[in-house]
Image (cartoon, rainbow, N blue to C red):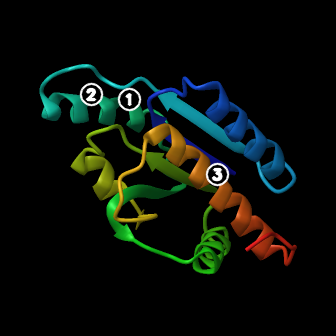
Amino acid sequence: MIKIICVGKIKEKYIKEAVNEYLKRLSKYTKVNIIEVDDVDNSNIDIILLKEKEKIEKYIDSKDYIITLEIEGNMLSSIEFAKKIDEIYLNYPNITFIIGGSHGLHSDIKNKSNYKLSFSKLTFPHQLFRVNLLEQIYRAYKINNNEMYHK
C-alpha cells in the first residue's frame, strides 16, 4: 500500500481531477491512501513546523517505509525510482510519502525518514507536486510490470 501524507488541501478543480485520474490508474496495482493535514497559519516558522509535525506523526506507522520529499534529497531517474519501490516492498508492506507544507518539514520528520527524495532543486506548488508524485508512482508500477507507458 502507498500512503501519501500531505500538508494542505487541494483547492483547484483541475488538480483534483488529475489526482483522481492517477488514483484510478494506480488502483490496478495498489491501494493509495492520501491523507491531508491542515496547514498551520502562524507567523513563526518554528511553530508552524512543530504543529505540522504533530499532525503528520499521527499517520505514521512503525511498519511504514518513510520517504520524505525534500529539496535536499536524492534525485532518481524514473527507472531508479521504480527499482527503489520494488526493493522497498521486499521488506515493508507500506510506503509512506510525506509532502511538507510551504516551509518544508520539521527536522524530527526528516530524521524518521528512511529515504529523502527530491524531484528537482526547483520549488513546486505543493498541490501540483502531488500530481507529479502520483504520476511517477504510476510510471514506476508500469515500469516494474514491464508495461508500455510514454517516455
Q: Quadrant of the C terminus?
A: bottom right
> Looking at the rendering, which quadrant does residue 85 occupy?
bottom right
How many numbered discs? 3
Q: Nearer the viewer, residue 54 or 36?
A: 36
What residue is drawn where x is 66% and y is 68%?
89
Q: In which quarter of the image is residue 92?
A: bottom right
Amino acid of disc 3: Leu
> What element does badge 3 sit on?
helix
Vertical placement of residue 151 versus 25, above or below: below
84 sits left or right of 120 in the view: right
User: Residue at left 63%, top 76%?
Assistant: 87
* Crowd around label 1: few <14 · some 14–19 · many ≥20 (10 Å): some
* Relative to 134, 113 lies left or right: left
Dot 1 corresponds to which residue?
Answer: 55
Q: Position of residue 122 (x, y in %)?
A: 36, 59
58, 67: nearer the viewer: 67
Tell me which residue sits at (78%, 51%) in the image.
Answer: 26
* Label 2 SS: helix
Place residue 105 in its image quadrant: top left
* Residue on which the image places disc 2: 51
x and y, in percent, of residue 2 in the image: 65, 51
Relative to residue 111, is residue 34 drawn left or right? Answer: right
Image spot of residue 96 (x, y percent): 54, 51
Tell which circle, 3 or 2, labels the residue nearer the N-terminal end: 2
Asked whether the residues under the numbered discs 1 and 2 touch, taking CB atoms below 8 Å apart as contact, a structural biologist would say yes
Q: Position of residue 84 (x, y in %)?
A: 59, 75
Give the residue pinned by disc 3.
134
Disc 1 from disc 3: Cα separation? 22 Å
Disc 2 packing (10 Å; few <14; some 14–19; many ≥20):
some
Say if mark 3 contacts mark 2, CB within 8 Å: no
Vertically, is 129 above or below 150? above
**Gap between marks 3 and 2, in whole Å?**
26 Å
